[in-house]
Image (cartoon, coloured by chain):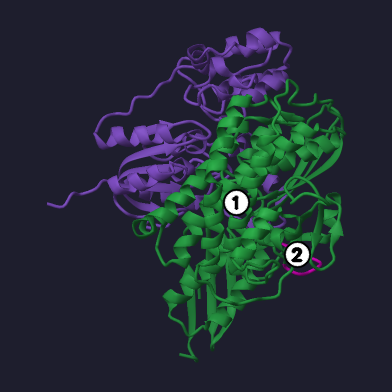
């Protein structure tokens, strides 16, 4: 009897292409993966079949055009599991900064004839539009996270997410705290682990590219950062950066902006 | 057949980075309309960089492109250091070059093996190609992996690396880490030589066309981070003069911004770099070119794949040279003293010239920014090439053949459409 391989698709929306590299940067493991599953849609690698029925659809990018808002619904209807990879798909990405601005005036500033461009005023997470089965926040996600989610889902097991903080990662890896010892502003206390605490390993503060951890205390971190001499505007920019529209970060950033304005 | 009008649309161009489409109209045996459409949605980077601090810019611009984040970071640091009147140390100069070598290897390695080679050998994807040519694919993935390793040596990860800052790097890699990478590079050098010879042996059309090559040129170095902007038609300008000569505009049949040099299309990227700088390559590279009977300059666009292989080999030699001379430092970056002003940065991204302009205000924050990525510069050239190449190929070929040939022509430029700082969505008029 011929073995039926699971089918997966990798779809791109508004993004930098960086998270789909979690597949293309696998090296020889990519060839192994292609033996275990059928990759039925992955434009950058070659296969095009956007409306194929699949077991797992990986989504990179946020929704920023009317066409994208329509396309994600079709993909949802055709996919058993839908997984978002990266900050754009999971929280809108850095381009969601338009959500706090006047998108029309931004368009006019960059494009001579903005009326010919079809774009929405917002860049939003996939979960704003359809049901998402599993979310991976990192900007960028890494190959291990993506493959681990695939293996779990194909076994019909809910992937386990580590939602603890970069702070704990630093402790596990034995890195000296950059905030305590050097006074470096660090987002580690509120940021989701998974990156390997790369920035503190270089002596720089975390800039929160992996998004919010579980049960974060943004007020406490705000006080810490203030005590290091950062202004409200500077702290707000740290929350409203790569993961600006992620829950917790958005509220903390907007609160500081409001405080500054009043 | 001659008197009918036919439309050929490639709605999604596979194996390019980002998303684009091509619309071709043929009328009485001639091309009546040809549109390369970029439908990557705009992300408005230039606006949300406003109000950001210098090092936030470095982390933000990486997000323009997951495939060439180093290029965006390097053009930005250069522009910001220009404004702050900073001079970086020779150590930083060398490390930036090393960082860039990694990205060229990563990007070119990915392009050659996963995007372009399946064209030349007639496979739908690298996966299909690997079944018949496992050794070629594995060699390519290995060299690509070495590029990733080098990016991670200085940046901790290959996508959106976190090591670079204005003034240099946050930390210097340990000598032991450098030696480990160096050993891998030395061991793998013969593979890059094989790659060059293999790419030159690929079946490709012997067609030449007129085009202008544009890139950076430095008196001593094969260009990466520094130099003047030059062409093979006499252009020789400082990077601050970019705007006076290289104009972004709209074309009547599309809304996509295109760049022209004094009204004409031009080529940027590895082939342009080799055409103008082959004399700066070390003897080892010239030896392999001789062995493979490869000559630069060339006006055959299909030779782009060879140019990428040559640059992988060069990047490996250059990386080995830099790593062999590596010294650890406790001052991996010079401190910043922000000031107001305007500055320019221009470096050689894997796909070609990447130009940035920033204005900073008195608070040391971005007042305005402009970014011109290489693919927007190549866009007019790609369309011109398609007109030329499809006529030369013969329009009486089947739709499938025309589609295949068009895609192959487009992929020569390795268009990276995801750098959508500057691309417009196109309304395709389907008759």
| Residue identifier under label 1 | B312
At a point 63% along the width and 33% down the height, the residue shown is: A100
Asked if A83 appears above or below B176 in the picture, the reply is below
- In this view of the protein, which residue sits in the foreground, B403 or A100? B403
The vertical placement of B208 against B108, above or below, is below
* Chain part drawn in magenta: B259-265
Pointers 1 and 2 within a single chain: yes
Determine the secondary structure under disc 1. helix
Q: Chain of mark 1?
A: B
Residue closer to the observer: A74 or B225? B225
At horizontal 86% and vertical 59% (from top left) the residue drawn is B236
Between label 1 and label 2, give the one nearer the viewer: 1
> How packed is label 2: few (under 14 Cα within 10 Å), some, or many (20 or more)?
many
Q: Report which colour depicts chain A.
A: purple
Depth check, front residue: A118 or A12 = A12
Q: Considering only vertical position in the picture, is B150 above or below A120?
A: above
Residue A261's disc is none
Q: Measured from the top left, where is residue B322 in percent x and y?
A: 69, 38
Q: Which residue is mark 2?
A: B260
Mark 1 touching mark 2, by CB under 8 A? no
Image quadrant of residue B326? Answer: top right
Give the residue displayed 53% in from the left and 15% down from the top. Answer: A170
Residue B262 in magenta stretch = yes
Q: Colour of chain B?
A: green
Where does residue A120 sit, x and y in percent of width and height? 56, 46
x and y, in percent, of residue B213 in the image:
73, 64
Image quadrant where one finds the N terminus of chain B: bottom left
Question: Real-space Cα distance between discs 1 and 2?
Answer: 29 Å
The crowd level at tag 1 (other Cα within 10 Å; few <14, some 14-19, many 20+) is many
Q: Quadrant of residue B164?
A: top right
């Amino acid at each position: 009897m011929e073995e039926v391989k699971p089918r997966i698709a990798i779809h791109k929306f508004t993004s930098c292409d960086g998270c789909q590299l979690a597949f293309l940067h696998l090296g020889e493991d990519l060839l192994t993966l292609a033996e275990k599953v059928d990759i039925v849609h992955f434009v950058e690698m070659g296969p095009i079949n956007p409306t194929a029925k699949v077991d797992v659809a990986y989504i990179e990018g946020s929704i920023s055009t009317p066409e994208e808002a329509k396309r994600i619904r079709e993909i949802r209807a055709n996919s058993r599991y839908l997984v978002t990879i990266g900050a754009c798909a999971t929280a809108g990405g850095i381009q969601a900064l338009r959500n706090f601005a006047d998108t029309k005036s931004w368009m006019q500033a960059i494009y001579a004839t903005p009326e010919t461009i079809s774009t929405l005023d917002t860049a939003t997470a996939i979960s704003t539009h359809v049901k998402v089965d599993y979310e991976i926040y990192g900007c960028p996600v890494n190959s291990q996270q993506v493959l681990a989610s695939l293996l779990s889902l194909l076994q019909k097991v809910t992937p386990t997410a580590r939602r603890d903080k970069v702070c704990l990662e630093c402790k596990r890896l034995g890195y000296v705290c950059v905030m305590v010892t050097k006074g470096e502003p660090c987002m580690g206390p509120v940021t989701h682990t998974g990156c390997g605490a790369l920035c503190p390993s270089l002596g720089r503060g975390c800039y929160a590219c992996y998004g919010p951890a579980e049960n974060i205390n943004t007020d406490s971190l705000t006080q810490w950062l203030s005590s290091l001499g950062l202004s409200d505007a500077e702290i707000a920019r740290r929350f409203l950066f790569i993961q600006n529209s992620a829950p917790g970060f958005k509220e903390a950033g907007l609160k500081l902006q409001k405080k500054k304005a009043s | 057949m001659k008197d009918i009008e036919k439309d050929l649309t490639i709605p999604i161009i596979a194996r390019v980075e980002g998303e684009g489409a091509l619309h071709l109209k043929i009328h009485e045996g001639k091309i009546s309309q040809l549109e390369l459409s970029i439908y990557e949605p705009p992300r408005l980077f230039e606006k949300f960089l406003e109000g950001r601090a210098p090092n936030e810019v470095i982390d933000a611009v990486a997000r323009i492109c997951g495939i060439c984040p180093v290029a965006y970071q390097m053009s930005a640091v250069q522009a910001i250091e220009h404004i702050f009147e900073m001079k970086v140390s020779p150590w930083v100069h060398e490390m930036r070059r090393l960082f860039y070598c990694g990205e060229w290897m990563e990007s070119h390695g990915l392009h050659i093996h996963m995007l372009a080679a399946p064209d030349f050998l007639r496979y739908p994807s690298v996966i299909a190609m690997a079944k018949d040519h496992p050794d070629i694919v594995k060699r390519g993935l290995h060299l690509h992996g070495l590029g990733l390793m080098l990016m991670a040596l200085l940046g901790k990860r290959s996508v959106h690396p976190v090591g670079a800052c204005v003034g240099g790097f946050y930390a210097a890699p340990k000598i032991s880490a450098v030696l480990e990478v160096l050993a891998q590079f030395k061991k793998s050098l013969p593979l890059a030589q094989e790659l060059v010879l293999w790419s030159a042996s690929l079946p490709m059309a012997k067609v030449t066309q007129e085009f202008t090559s544009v890139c950076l040129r430095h008196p001593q170095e094969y260009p990466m981070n520094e130099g003047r902007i030059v062409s093979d038609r006499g252009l020789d300008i400082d990077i601050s003069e970019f705007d006076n000569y290289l104009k972004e505009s709209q074309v009547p049949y599309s809304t996509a911004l295109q760049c022209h040099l004094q009204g004409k299309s031009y080529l940027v990227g590895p082939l342009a770099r080799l055409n103008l700088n082959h004399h700066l390559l070390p003897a080892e590279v010239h030896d392999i070119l001789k062995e493979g009977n490869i000559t630069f300059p060339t006006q055959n666009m299909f030779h782009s794949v060879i140019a990428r292989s040559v640059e992988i080999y060069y990047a490996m030699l250059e990386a080995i040279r830099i790593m062999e001379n590596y010294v650890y430092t406790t001052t991996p970056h010079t401190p910043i003293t922000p000031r107001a002003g305007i500055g320019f940065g221009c470096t050689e991204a894997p796909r070609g010239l990447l130009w940035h302009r920033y204005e900073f205000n008195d608070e040391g924050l971005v007042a305005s920014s402009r970014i011109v990525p290489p693919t927007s510069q190549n866009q007019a050239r790609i369309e011109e090439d398609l007109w030329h190449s499809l006529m030369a190929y013969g329009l009486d070929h089947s739709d499938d053949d025309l589609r295949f040939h068009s895609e192959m022509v487009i992929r020569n430029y390795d268009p990276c459409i995801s750098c959508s700082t500057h691309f417009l969505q196109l309304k395709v008029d389907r008759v």
